[in-house]
Image: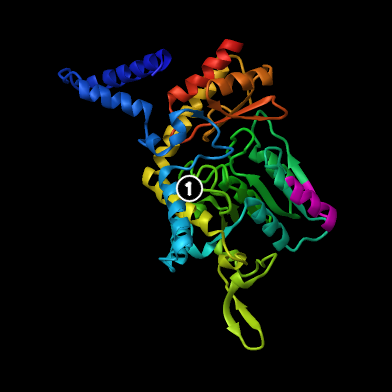
């Protein structure tokens, strides 16, 4: 523990002791074992660092790019590879697939029939765009903080179908609901957002956007790749019509398994945008087929079984740690990181009080020099906007020492 972290730790534990003492003046002094336990909790608040070997050497503040694989997930992928090599458990893959679907639905407040496993979030954005019966003059509303795929998909749709793409500006790092309402009308068929922005971590309040677009007869799609795994949620209560994430970031699984949620009321009218043997529910005479009616109808081909094995184990791991505990820890630590960057005079792009684990700032330093210094210190991060924007992500395994390693580098350079 470095000096800064030790001072912060002692200040917090002293404050906690003072608060506790208001109820009694005869509390026993903490034992040496209790002090060690408190320090261990400070270094590893969620008790998970041993499951993430990346923490042995790095201050890994880059989960918004790729989350490191924890040991239980690595073991599940190795077990899958062993099965592929030996074929000792022929029914294991199907059982893993079914369990992963059940786990995702249970963890995020959905029904299993509302969940499909795609290969990427881009698949989902295309699927939703292609399922809607667009008419010339219809419009889609997005904001400047959305991921690039949305703009590629909807500019192409604009060119091909004569619809209008309306873009909400980001004001002080936020895409405000009132600006969405101002751009939404009776011809708005879809609002599409990055639930948590990959650029600065801004988190939308989905029920508000759902009310705006539903009142006008449209749908709400949320790209949840920076959201799933970072806070508790109930997809039914969020009011969102469609949402998709992927395993390789905050769920700590792998590429190639992108859980898609489709609200059950839409499953009757939504058509897949491609077809294959994976959708067959019943084989009929004359080479005809009855297709499944659940969200599984979007799983048109063989799934990526290794990725689903990783997802299954990762969902179990995240569930055991607890999404509420993950959110409390990471959002608090991200808030402290934001405060430290503000203290150092950096230009914050992440709004104050934003409930997510991502913090970004315009560092106003030489990006090459800053990048080298951070790499030498063992800090992993992401540069965006040609190196001008520094994006940092606080995960369940990060602690105050990880943040301090970053802050020390920037403090030396300002």
Q: Which residue is mark 1?
A: 233
Residue 334 in the image, given as x and y percentages of width and height: 50, 28
Q: Residue 339 versus residue 94: which sits nearer the camera?
A: 94
Look at 45% across and 66% down and name the residue there.
Answer: 87
Residue 354 in the magenta stretch? The answer is no
Magenta-highlighted residues: 151-165
- Answer few, some or many: residues within 10 Å of disc 1's Cα (few below 14, many 20 plus, some between 14 and 19): some
Residue 164 in the magenta stretch? The answer is yes
Vertical position of residue 36 compared to residue 301: above or below: above
Residue 166 sits in which quadrant? Answer: top right
Q: Quadrant of the N terminus?
A: top left
Q: Is residue 194 left or right of residue 79?
A: right
Q: Residue 350 versus residue 361: which sits nearer the camera?
A: 361
Residue 256 in the image, given as x and y percentages of width and height: 58, 53
Q: Is residue 366 left or right of residue 34?
A: right
- Residue 78 visible to the viewer: yes
Q: Residue 170 versus residue 63: which sits nearer the camera?
A: 63
Look at 48% across and 61% down and name the residue there.
Answer: 84
Q: Which type of secondary structure does the marked residue at label 1 adopt?
A: loop
The prevailing secondary structure element of the residues shown in magenta is: helix
Vertical position of residue 353 compared to residue 87: above or below: above
Q: Residue furthest front?
A: 86
Q: Is residue 322 left or right of residue 32?
A: right
């Amino acid at each position: 523990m470095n000096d800064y972290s030790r001072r912060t730790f002692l200040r917090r534990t002293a404050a906690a002791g003072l608060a506790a003492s208001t109820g009694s003046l005869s509390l026993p002094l903490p034992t040496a074992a209790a002090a060690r336990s408190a320090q261990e909790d400070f270094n590893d608040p969620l008790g998970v660092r041993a499951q993430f070997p990346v923490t042995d050497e790095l201050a890994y503040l880059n989960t918004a790019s790729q989350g490191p694989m924890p040991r239980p997930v690595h073991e599940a992928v190795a077990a899958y590879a062993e099965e592929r090599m030996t074929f000792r458990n022929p029914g294991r893959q199907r059982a893993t697939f079914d369990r992963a679907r059940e786990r995702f639905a249970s963890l995020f407040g959905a029904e299993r029939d509302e969940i499909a496993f795609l290969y990427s979030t881009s698949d989902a954005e295309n699927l939703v765009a292609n399922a809607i019966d667009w008419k010339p003059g219809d419009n889609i509303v997005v904001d400047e903080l959305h991921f690039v795929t949305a703009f590629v998909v909807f500019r192409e749709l604009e060119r091909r179908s004569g619809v209008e793409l309306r873009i909400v500006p980001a004001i002080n790092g936020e895409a405000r609901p009132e600006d969405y309402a101002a751009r939404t009308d009776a011809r708005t068929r879809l609002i599409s957002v990055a639930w948590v922005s990959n650029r600065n971590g801004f988190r939308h309040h989905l029920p508000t956007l759902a009310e705006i677009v539903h009142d006008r007869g449209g749908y709400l799609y949320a790209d949840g790749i920076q959201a799933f795994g970072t806070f508790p949620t109930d997809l039914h209560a969020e009011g969102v019509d469609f949402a998709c994430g992927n395993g390789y970031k905050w769920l700590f699984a792998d590429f190639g398994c992108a859980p898609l949620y489709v609200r059950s009321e839409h499953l009757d009218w939504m058509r897949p945008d491609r077809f294959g043997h994976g959708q067959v529910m019943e084989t009929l005479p004359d080479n005809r087929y009855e297709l499944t009616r659940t969200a599984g109808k979007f799983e048109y081909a063989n799934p990526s079984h290794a990725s689903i094995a990783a997802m299954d184990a990762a969902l179990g791991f995240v569930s055991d740690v607890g999404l509420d505990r993950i959110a409390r820890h990471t959002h608090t630590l991200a808030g402290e990181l934001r405060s430290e960057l503000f203290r150092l005079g950096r230009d914050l792009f992440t709004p104050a009080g934003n409930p997510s684990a991502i913090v970004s700032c315009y560092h106003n330093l030489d990006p090459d020099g800053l990048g080298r210094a951070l790499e030498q210190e063992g800090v992993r991060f992401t540069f965006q906007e040609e190196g001008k924007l520094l994006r940092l992500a606080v995960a369940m395994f990060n602690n105050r020492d990880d943040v301090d390693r970053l802050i020390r580098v920037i403090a030396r350079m300002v």
